[in-house]
Amino acid sequence: METETIEAETISNATISAMAWSVELLPGRVFRLVTHGSFSLECIREMLHELIAHPQWRPGRDLIADHRDLDFGLTSMTDLRIAARIHRRLDAHVGDGRIALLMGNTFSYSMGRFLQLISEAEVSAELKVFDDPAKAESWIRDHVFVPDSRSSRN
């Protein structure tokens, strides 16, 4: 039943200009996800599936999600709640690593903080929002990756 609701709520946001992303593995087993375009729930779902399907991804890996060029202008609080539910459904695959959300302006930073707050009790990963790339990278680099014991792909 929840899937039908999410699909219905996604329709209005899916028609906005395309959201694009790239995924790369950095030295130290840290992943970087770079997004641009307009926020889209359908793309968020697809992007997370692509990330966890990466051959080097393991639950518990750390991630820098660089959303500085992502437009959150038409994103609602409901959209962010649905994005948190999408993450929750994939929690066993994402794991308990750190996720640095790197935002480009005050509005997107506040959207990131809202997502962080509503996700804290729902997902295993530790999310933190940044507006400074050096601080985001430092926070990620200070974390030691320990493979999530729930995964058989370690």
Image (cartoon, helix red, strand yellow):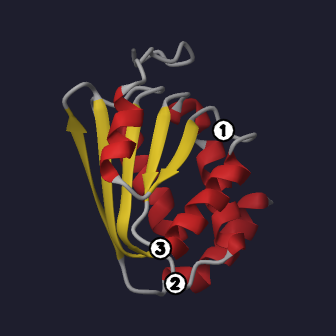
Measured as percent of width and height from the top left, residue 31 is found at 31, 39
For the C terminus, the quadrant is: top left
Q: Is residue 29 left or right of residue 70?
A: left
Q: Which residue is mark 3?
A: 39
Q: Position of residue 72 (x, y in %)?
A: 50, 77
Is 3 on the left-hand or right-hand side of 42? right
Left-right relation of 87 to 71 = right
- Mark identifier at residue 152: none
- Name the front one of labels 2 and 1: 2
Task: Decide: is 20 above or below 102.
Answer: below
Disc 1 is placed on an element classified as loop
Q: Determine which residue is flagged by label 1.
A: 123
Which SS class for mark 3?
Answer: loop
x%, y% of residue 26? 21, 36
User: In the depicted view, which residue is nearer to us: 91 or 29?
Assistant: 29
Task: Using the image as rendered, state which of residue 66 and residue 78 is in the foreground.
Answer: 66
Q: Quadrant of the N terminus?
A: bottom right
- Of callouts 3 and 2, the N-terminal one: 3
- Return the disc, 2 or 1, that comes first in the chain's sequence: 2
Position of 128 with respect to 2 (left or right) is: left
Q: Residue at x 39, y 68 (%)?
A: 104
Task: Measuring from the top left, give residue 102's x and y in whole percent.
Answer: 41, 56
What residue is rendered at 47% in x and 26% in y?
Answer: 60
Q: Residue furthest left?
A: 27
Three-letter code for the amino acid on which mark 1 is drawn: Val
Q: Secondary structure at mark 2?
A: loop
For label 2, the residue is: 73
Name the residue rendered at 40%, 18% in the picture. 144
